[in-house]
C-alpha cells in the first residue's frame, strides 16, 4: 500500500489528488505532510509544492508547515516515551542515529534547525536522535519550527509558480540547483559535526588512565 502511494505521488498525481479532495479543506494537505515523519520516502518537495499549487502560496505554506512540524513533534514524543523499549534501543543503535545523538547533545538547537532547513535528507533520524538525547521538547519544537518554516517557504514559492516553470523549463534549473545545494549543505553539516565528534573523542581522557 505504501509503495502504491509513493508511486502515485511520484508520477505527478499529487496535485490532481489534492484537487479531487479539496472539499475536505486543509486535511489532505496537512495529512500527507504529517505522514512524512512516518513514511520517510514521501517526497517533501512534491508534497509541499503541490500544497502551494492547490491551496495558494500562504495557505499551502501554512498547511505544509503544520503537517511537517506536527509530524516531527509526534515522532519526538513517541520516541521519548518508548526510549527504553527494545525497539527504540535497536533503532538508536544505528550508526547514523548514534552520531545524531552525539551531535544533538553537543549543539542541539543548531543541529535541528540547520537540518530542518533542508528539503532532502533523513530528518526522521534527526528527530529520533534529538528525542533519544533528551533534548528539551520546547527547544526541539522551536528549532524544528523555524527550520521547517524556511524550507517550506522556499519550496512553496517554487510550487506556487509551477506554471511559470513549466512554460520556461530552463528555470527548472533553479529547482535542481536547490536540491543539489541542499544535499551539499547536508553533507557539509554532517562532516562538521563528525569533526566535532572526533575532536571530543580525542580530548576525552579514558577513565582507566585516571586511576
Image: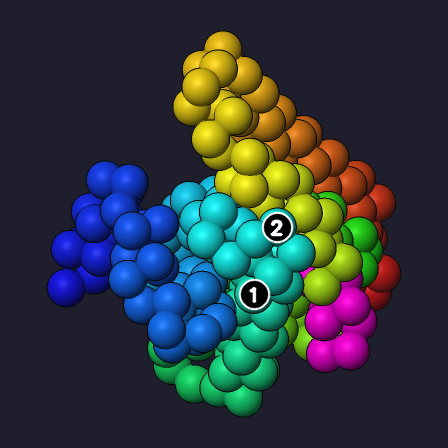
Under circle 1, the secondary element is helix
Q: Above or below — where is 129 with respect to 16?
A: below
Residue at 56 percent across and 65 percent down: it is 63
Please, which residue is most extreme toward the bottom here? 81
Question: Where is mark 2, residue-wise?
Answer: 57
Q: Above or below — where is 201 with respect to 100?
A: above
In depth, the one of 80 and 77 nearer the eye is 77
- Return the x and y of residue 43 as percentages of the image width and height: 40, 47
* Any part of residue 100 in sight: no
Mark closer to the chain start, 1 or 2: 2
Residue at 26 percent across and 47 percent down: it is 13
Span of residues in magenta? 137-144
Residue at 15 percent across and 55 percent down: it is 4
* Any part of residue 87 in sight: yes
Quadrant in the picture for residue 158: top right
Q: Can you say which quadrant of the picture contains the N terminus? A: bottom left
Q: Which of marks 1 and 2 is in front?
A: 2
Question: Where is mark 1, residue-wise?
Answer: 63
- Return the x and y of residue 54 as percentages of the image width and height: 46, 53
Residue at 51 percent across and 58 percent down: it is 55
Separation of residues labelled 1 and 2 (CA atoms): 10 Å
- Return the x and y of residue 211 as percentages of the image width and height: 83, 65
The label number, if any, that marks residue 89 in the structure image? none
Figure colour scheme: rainbow
Would residue 189 be counted in the magenta stretch?
Answer: no
CA neighbours of label 1 inside 10 A, class few (<14), some (14 to 19), many (20+):
many
Left or right for 187, reference 78? right
Classified by dominant secondary structure, the portion drawn in magenta counts as: helix
- Return the x and y of residue 16 as percentages of the image width and height: 29, 51
CA neighbours of label 2 inside 10 A, class few (<14), some (14 to 19), many (20+):
some
In depth, the one of 87 and 184 nearer the eye is 184
Would residue 138 be counted in the magenta stretch?
Answer: yes
Amino acid at each position: 500500500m505504501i509503495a502504491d502511494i509513493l508511486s502515485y505521488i511520484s508520477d505527478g498525481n499529487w496535485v490532481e489528488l489534492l484537487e479531487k479532495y479539496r472539499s475536505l479543506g486543509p486535511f489532505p494537505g496537512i495529512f500527507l505532510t504529517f505522514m512524512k515523519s512516518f513514511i520517510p520516502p514521501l517526497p517533501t518537495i512534491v508534497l509541499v509544492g503541490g500544497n502551494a499549487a492547490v491551496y495558494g502560496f500562504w495557505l499551502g505554506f501554512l498547511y505544509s508547515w503544520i503537517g511537517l512540524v506536527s509530524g516531527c513533534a509526534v515522532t519526538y514524543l513517541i520516541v521519548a516515551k518508548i526510549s527504553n523499549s527494545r525497539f527504540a534501543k535497536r533503532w538508536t543503535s544505528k550508526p547514523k542515529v548514534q552520531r545524531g545523538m552525539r551531535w544533538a547533545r553537543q549543539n542541539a538547537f543548531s543541529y535541528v534547525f540547520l537540518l530542518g532547513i533542508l528539503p532532502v535528507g533523513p530528518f526522521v533520524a534527526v528527530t529520533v536522535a534529538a528525542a533519544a538525547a533528551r533534548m528539551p521538547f520546547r527547544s526541539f519544537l522551536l528549532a524544528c519550527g523555524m527550520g521547517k518554516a524556511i524550507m517550506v517557504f522556499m519550496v512553496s514559492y517554487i510550487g506556487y509558480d509551477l506554471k511559470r516553470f513549466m512554460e520556461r523549463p530552463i528555470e527548472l534549473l533553479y529547482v535542481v540547483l536547490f536540491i543539489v545545494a541542499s544535499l551539499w549543505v547536508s553533507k557539509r553539516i554532517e562532516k562538521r559535526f563528525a569533526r566535532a565528534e572526533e575532536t571530543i573523542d580525542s580530548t576525552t581522557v579514558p577513565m582507566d588512565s585516571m586511576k
